[in-house]
Amino acid sequence: VPEIRTPGCKLTKQHPYPVVLVHGTWANAQKWEDRAPFLQQQGYCIFAMNYGFDARSAIYHNAKAGKFATNNIYSSAIELNNYVNKVLKLTGAKKVDLIG
């Protein structure tokens, strides 16, 4: 399940912060595929990742099934933090806006 990323993202005075879309339990980044294009058309730099995959779960042992956010909250928070840092580095922004 691919992440969502605005190609050629350019921050503007009107939209100085990239937006990171955070999916909920048993979802994935594609949850945002109907909303992300609208936000991108409005000039926002949009990013969405898959986080919280629990490889130990008997029910959700296949990442290709697209079931994420099933790992413990601490691990998911670390993943989200690392992704936000990646977005900050990619865009040069000082912070992001999170939407969940």
Image (tube, helix red, strand yellow):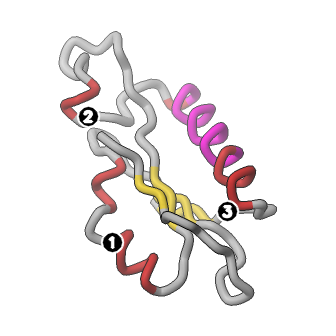
**Residue drawn at x 42%, y 25% as measured from the top left:** 71
Mark 3 neighbour class, 10 Å CA radius: few under 14, some 14 to 19, many 20 or more:
some
Position of residue 99 relative to residue 82, above or below, is below
Residue 77 image-quadrant placement: top right
- Horizontal side of residue 31 vs 100, given as left or right: left
| Residue 3 shown left or right of residue 88 in the figure | left
Point out residue 50 in the picture as x, y percentages from the top left corner.
Answer: 41, 40
Q: Horizontally, is 31 left or right of 48 in the view?
A: left
The residue that appears at 58% across and 68% down in the rendered structure is: 9
SS for tag 1?
loop
Residue beneath disc 1 = 35
- Say which element carries label 3: loop
Taking the spot 56% from the left edge, 70% from the top edge, the residue there is 45
User: Separation of disc 2 and disc 3 at Cα?
Assistant: 25 Å
Highlighted magenta segment, given as a residue range:
74-85
Image quadrant in which the C terminus is located: bottom left
Residue position marked by numbered label 2 in the rendering: 67
Q: Residue at x 58, y 41 (%)?
A: 80
- Dominant SS type (magenta): helix
User: Which residue is at the front of the view, 10 or 68?
Assistant: 10
The image shows residue 94, relative to residue 82, as above or below, that is: below
Q: CA distance from mark 3 to mark 1?
A: 18 Å
Q: Is residue 28 above or below residue 98?
A: above
Amino acid type of the residue tagged 2 in the rendering: Lys
> Residue 54: within the magenta?
no
* Nearest to N terminus: mark 3 or mark 1: 1
Residue 43: x %, y % from top left: 53, 83
Kindly identify the amino acid type of the residue bearing the numbered disc 3: Val
Quick one: quadrant of the N terminus? top left
Spot the residue most to the front. 8
Q: Nearer the viewer, residue 74 or 98?
A: 98
